[in-house]
Image (cartoon, rainbow, N blue to C red):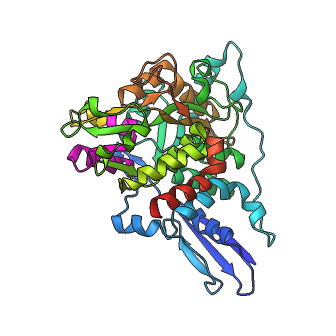
Amino acid sequence: MIVVVIVVVGAVAVIVVDIRAEAVVGEAVALLVLRIVQAGFAYNDGGRDCSIKQTPRQRRRARRVGRLRPAQEHAILPLTASPAGRRARRLATLAGAAACAGLLSAGTAVLAQTAPAPAIYEYQGADRPQRVLDGARHEGSVVLYTSLATSESVPLTQAFEKKYGVRVQLWRSVSENVLQRTVAEARAHRNSVDVVETNGPELEALIRERLLAPFFSPYLADIMPSALPAHHMWAGDRTEYFVVAYNTDKVRRAELPATYEGFLAPQWQGRLALEANDEQWLGALIKTWGEARALAFFRKLVALKPEVRAGHILLAQLIVAGEVPVALTAYGPNAEALKRQGKPIDWLPVQPLVGRPQGIAVARSAPHPNAALLFADFVLSPEGQQLLESMSRFPTSRKVKSALSGTEAVMLDPAEVLAKDEAWRAIWSEALHR
């Protein structure tokens, strides 16, 4: 038997887990319970980044698989504890949240929120702009949960506040924590969030939890089709591209091959790096080339012994420092931002160029539905999209040009990522560690 009690006081939650010694509890259930309580808290305080920071030791611990054993009765876990690893994060954060009721075979179930969405979300009348604006000003504020760095999310929200006079309460953390906090609050019947802006797979997980609602925006027509799912429960506002980034003091642009397979040449041995958790990039290669060709390429690449570093920001910084001459799976916005600062880094969209949509959504039970719509409209508008581009992001609007406008790319389907990420991760890990 499992008894889960959530007590929310301010920003603190405690889960009491009572696991009887005789109970048969699947590993997935134990991991799910662990991950539900692992939301890190961050918020914007006068423009300062208040995200929870992890030490290297904490990051190493976070990669281990957390388990609950029958002997651990009455385990009390603080919401900020982080004992579980990447496998736990993926099981519970992306897939486990959607399968929670089925996994708890002992009879525990979480009631999904089925309240009807506000009618204004899909309203398309001629007076919509004024109705939404008047409603938002009456509501006075909007609560935003986002994984967009505060160096970008703060200027974005400040521009919105200046234009409309509606205050933004900004909470920023990594995408996994955005998902976890949103789900945890909904299950505790604390409907605090109005807008969620984060990675596409996490938004798809929220759809499975019935926490998002379809919405209309006059700017959806401008969004590239690959960033606009048919269900319209979120819309892509930016794209994360995997690019080849390099140190301009150590590598000449003319040296770089046009395709990833060109990096299998012997001269690249000892000069390459990968980010440690980019199995989604490998998944896109499998989808594009077929499994046999993609796995043959990846195994040959691993045989060249590339450096494997955890964290895309760290990877970009190592390129600037000259410790990594070439990174094959750098995030385009990280490389572009450092390039604009005059650092010795540049990047190239090597084929197949892989992209992953990141999007914006409105909460089904938003306390401020008009303000939520107004903020979504602003971010998707040419004005908001241009602001994102000015901060080295790649906007999805076809009305705003970026460095990758018109470039052929393989776009990951967030719903497919949600379904296949574990399988891709297993292939990635087996090849790296064999």
Q: Position of residue 142 (x, y in %)?
A: 54, 37
- The residue at the far left in this view is 249
Q: Position of residue 261 (x, y in %)?
A: 43, 39
In the image, is 96 to the left or to the right of 348?
A: right
In the foreground, 376 or 370: 376
Indicate yes or no whether the magenta region holds residue 28: no
Instruction: Report the magenta stretch's main SS.
Output: helix
Indicate yes or no whether the magenta region holds residue 333: yes
In the figure, residue 162 lies in which quadrant? Answer: top left
In the foreground, 426 or 413: 426
Q: Position of residue 336 (x, y in %)?
A: 33, 33
- Which span of residues is magenta-colored? 312-336
In the foreground, 371 or 28: 28
Please give the name of the residue rendered at 34% of the width and 64% of the height, measured from the top-left corner.
55
User: Can you say whether 181 is above or below 378 in the image?
Assistant: below
Residue 332 in view, yes or no: yes
Q: Position of residue 357 (x, y in %)?
A: 54, 35
Please give the name of the residue rendered at 39% of the width and 50% of the height, measured from the top-left corner.
274
In the figure, residue 268 lies in which quadrant? Answer: top left
- The residue at the far top in this view is 126
Please give the name of the residue rendered at 47% of the width and 45% of the height, measured from the top-left corner.
147
In the foreground, 318 or 171: 318
